Image (cartoon, helix red, strand yellow):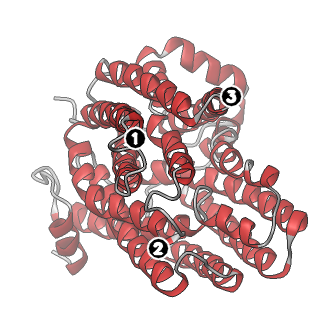
């Protein structure tokens, strides 16, 4: 057995009785390379974060609030909405690795451009430049999302994919904690423009390194789909959602699970209204994200390989109940404004979101056959991009009545999502 296979098998637990030595060596090598590339990508994501670092950077350079409000929609929807249209292009290729490399290069260039914009521009100019580059970043990321899951499905068997996602989350979480502590110790409550620009530059370098690592993955050739055999992506997407009931239920469940993604900013808003609530400065936000990944990544990865459907259900239920408890404590005079309430809630929500993310990524790869994996990922992400805009718009409108009202809406949504996830088929175990 090769050293890479031994290292991989010490990190990833699975039943390999049906794999010969050569198969174990190939899986081990490809698995380690994808763990490393995904970790480098996730490390960059900790910096190009539309909820923490980017709004902090634009505030530091005097960008208007109207621009700040575009960051999350552009970052999240921009990487999801184009995927159904991109899917036919990928399906016409026997190899998907090259698309991942193009996406990584695009993210590296966009992030380097953001670093330059933050370092040299101010006000509206800086805001517009960063949002435009974030749109390029998100479009590039859609390629990584599509191609990465397909390559993972081709190179790593069931029972191991969730652990790869989990290990990458753990390692990027450790980096985030280190980064957050450094920001807190060096910058305190204020982080200078120069430091933020340097962080963005380092994130761009992380994607360059990820590109070099992922280029070494050995992906088996798949059967390309001829252009003449493909219908239009809009009609194909609608037909898939209409005819494939298990997939349609997964999309609905994933859309209803947005409680863990959209709740944290409202918790931070309530903390700010109470005078900070222990969340002053950029560092603690980054640390909380890192702790969630470090604590939950590997554990959730193993749980996802056992049953990604069960993990989705429990994580969504936990997020909804957590929001409900938070709202109750926020309304009680004895705990309202308590220094521990807001950072602890933010951390636990980040942990629940880690569970949801690892579970849904593993689920969609496991449920799709070889011929439908790219289509499933693309159509589900495009549909979620639309649902994200709808749910985000509704929660933002409700927030005009108060952040607590928006949180209540998201908690109810999450409970419905947990129920829908509970009736999904379990696809984590190989068919007998």
Label 1 and label 3: CA atoms lie apart by 34 Å
Disc on the earlier residue, 1 or 3: 1
Circle 3/circle 2 CB separation < 8 Å: no
Residue 71 rendering spot, x and y as whole percentages: 70, 52
Residue 11 rendering spot, x and y as whole percentages: 20, 66
In the image, residue 135 sits, relative to residue 261, either above or below, namely below
Disc on the earlier residue, 3 or 2: 2
Query: In the image, which is nearer the foreground, mark 1 or mark 3?
Result: 3
Q: Which residue is mark 2?
A: 216
Label 3 and label 2: CA atoms lie apart by 47 Å
In the image, residue 361 sits, relative to residue 198, either above or below, namely above
Instruction: Tell me: 289 left or right of 294.
Output: right
Which part of the image, by quadrant, shows the C terminus?
Answer: top left
Q: 155 and 307: which one is in front?
A: 307
In the displayed orientation, state which residue is furthest to the front.
Answer: 333
Q: Which residue is mark 1?
A: 365
Query: In the image, which is nearer the foreground, mark 3 or mark 2?
Result: 3
Q: Name the residue at 44% across, 32% down.
A: 257
Residue 149 rendering spot, x and y as whole percentages: 46, 49
Q: Name the residue at 37% across, 39% down.
A: 333
Residue 163 rendering spot, x and y as whole percentages: 27, 55
Q: Which residue is mark 3?
A: 397
Q: Which mark is residue 162?
A: none
- The answer to whether residue 251 of the structure is visible from this angle is no
* Badge 3: residue crowd in 10 Å (few <14, some 14–19, many ≥20): some
Label 1 and label 2: CA atoms lie apart by 22 Å
């Amino acid at each position: 057995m090769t050293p890479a296979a031994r290292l991989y098998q010490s990190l990833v637990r699975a039943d390999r009785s049906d794999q010969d030595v050569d198969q174990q060596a190939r899986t081990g090598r490809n698995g380690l390379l994808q763990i490393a590339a995904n970790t480098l990508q996730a490390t960059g994501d900790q910096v190009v974060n539309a909820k923490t670092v980017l709004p902090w950077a634009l505030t530091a350079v005097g960008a208007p609030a109207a621009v700040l409000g575009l960051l999350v929609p552009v970052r999240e929807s921009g990487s999801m909405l184009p995927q159904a249209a991109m899917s036919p292009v990928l399906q016409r290729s026997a190899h998907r690795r090259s698309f991942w490399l193009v996406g990584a290069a695009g993210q590296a260039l966009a992030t380097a451009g953001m670093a330059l914009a933050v370092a040299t521009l101010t006000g509206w100019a800086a805001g517009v430049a960063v949002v435009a580059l974030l749109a390029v970043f998100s479009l590039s990321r859609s390629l990584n999302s599509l191609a990465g899951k397909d390559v993972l499905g081709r190179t790593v068997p069931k029972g191991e994919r969730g652990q790869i996602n989990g290990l990458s989350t753990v390692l990027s979480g450790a980096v985030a904690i280190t980064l957050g502590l450094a920001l807190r110790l060096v910058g305190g409550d204020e982080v200078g423009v120069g430091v933020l620009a340097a962080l963005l530059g380092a994130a761009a370098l992380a994607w360059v390194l990820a590109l070099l690592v992922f280029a070494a993955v050995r992906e088996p050739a798949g059967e390309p789909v001829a252009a003449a055999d493909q219908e239009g992506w809009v009609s194909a997407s609608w037909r898939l959602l209409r005819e494939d009931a298990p997939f349609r239920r997964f999309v609905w469940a994933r859309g209803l699970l947005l409680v863990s993604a959209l709740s944290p900013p409202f918790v931070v808003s309530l903390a700010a209204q109470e005078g900070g609530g222990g969340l002053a400065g950029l560092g603690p936000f980054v640390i909380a994200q890192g702790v969630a990944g470090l604590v939950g990544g590997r554990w959730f990865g193993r749980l996802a390989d056992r049953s990604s459907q069960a993990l989705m259900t429990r994580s969504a239920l936990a997020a909804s109940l957590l929001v409900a408890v938070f709202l109750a404590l926020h309304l009680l005079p004895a705990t309202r404004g308590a220094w521990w309430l807001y950072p602890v809630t933010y951390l636990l929500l980040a942990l629940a979101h880690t569970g949801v993310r690892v579970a849904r990524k593993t689920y969609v790869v496991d449920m799709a056959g070889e011929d439908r994996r790219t289509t499933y990922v693309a159509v589900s992400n495009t549909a979620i991009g639309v649902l994200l805009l709808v749910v985000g718009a509704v929660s933002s409108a409700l927030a005009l009545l108060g952040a607590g009202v928006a949180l209540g809406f998201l908690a109810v949504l999450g409970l419905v999502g947990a129920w829908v996830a509970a009736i999904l088929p379990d696809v984590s175990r190989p068919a007998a």
